[in-house]
Image (spheres, rainbow, N blue to C red):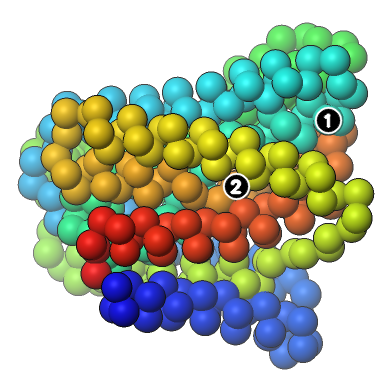
Amino acid sequence: MTSVLLRAFSFTLVIVIGIVMRSSGLVSSNAGDAVKKFLIYITLPAAIITNFSAITDIGAEMVLIALLGIIANVIMIAAGALITRHRTRGEQALNMLCLPAFNIGAFCLPFVQSFLPALGSVTACMFDVGNSIMCTGGTYAFVAEYTSENRRGLNLKSFVKRLISSPPLVTYVVMFTLSVMGLQLPDAVLTLVNPMASANTFIAMLMLGLLFHLELKKEYIKEIIRLLGLRHIFAAVCALIFYFLLPFDLVIRQTLALLCFAPMSAVSPAYTGMCGGDEGLASCANSISILFSLVTITILLGIMGLN
């Protein structure tokens, strides 16, 4: 347990360094955006390539895991629509965008890489394929239409364009396709990519710290407790189902259980504002969800005996 706590604390320390650097003025206020681009375009795709290359046999269950990523989002979108059906459009947007969507690549994947075998990382990547389809554009496209005064239907062209402009998602699909076909990237390519992949954990945690935003207004507290409470109840139910009922390898089930407690997607606050919701409330809830996930996932790692 001491080993788990130390390694989890090392992640937390990097986040704190990012917060201190931004709040003290050591870096500019938009430094987080620059680091985020570095993560999305360089280190996260590199980590995906490295993780997939370590697995020689991709089973059919990986397709099901990607579908689970979509299903989990759809259920929470529906729950958000149901509980806010008599509330304002802004409140509907807030709930339908902040209840679903998991921050896998920038938060959970570093934990999985550090505590589980390569199969765990591939599992996280495949779950994030389905999750990314929703949180990088699918959910926003639906919610924007659902909350619009003039509903005109889903813009399929815009939706597809948003998906193919996501480097991590494209990398997931390409590497999964190569793995299914039994093709491997040359060792020379993996050697070149490895240093960037190794930097992913540090870059991801630093980005979270630089982007950390906590403006805890009194009127936010009740809504944040409700949002995070619903997310964690859903996470607990899914984790129990995934861990005890799915007929998969233990590493896959452990990984899925951890992913259930991922924090909100980093893009949820921006999409909330674009749909007329309270972006400040969504940003605050997002930051607090990171703290909750740090504690919850660390506890789960200890319970599972992963170190």
Residue corresponding to mark 1: 91
Give residue 160's position: percent from left, percent from top: 54, 26
Instruction: Say which element carries label 2.
Output: loop
Res 162 → quadrant: top right
Q: How far apart are labels 1 and 2 at the CA level?
A: 17 Å
* Vertical placement of residue 232 versus 275, above or below: below
Q: Residue at 23% x, 29% y: name it.
A: 246
Question: Few, some or many C-alpha atoms within 10 Å of disc 2 (few <14, some 14-19, many ≥20)?
Answer: many
Q: Residue at 68% x, 34% y: name it.
A: 97
* Residue 186 circle label: none
Q: Residue at 31% x, 64% y: name it.
A: 302
Question: Few, some or many C-alpha atoms within 10 Å of disc 1 (few <14, some 14-19, many ≥20)?
Answer: many
- Type of amino acid under label 2: Met
Res 291 → quadrant: bottom right
- Type of amino acid under label 1: Glu
> Which mark sits nearer the N-terminus, 1 or 2?
1
- Which is nearer the eye, 186 or 266? 266
Instruction: Say which element carries label 1.
Output: helix
Q: Quadrant of the N terminus?
A: bottom left
Give residue 55's position: percent from left, percent from top: 13, 50
- Which is nearer the eye, 257 or 125? 257
Give residue 272's position: percent from left, percent from top: 77, 38
- Which is nearer the eye, 229 or 170? 229
Q: Quadrant of the C terminus?
A: bottom left
* Vertical placement of residue 255 versus 88, above or below: below
Tell me if I can see residue 135 in this picture: no
Residue corresponding to mark 2: 264
Going by the image, does 151 lie left or right of 205? right
- Which is nearer the eye, 67 or 88? 88
Going by the image, does 256 lie left or right of 184? right
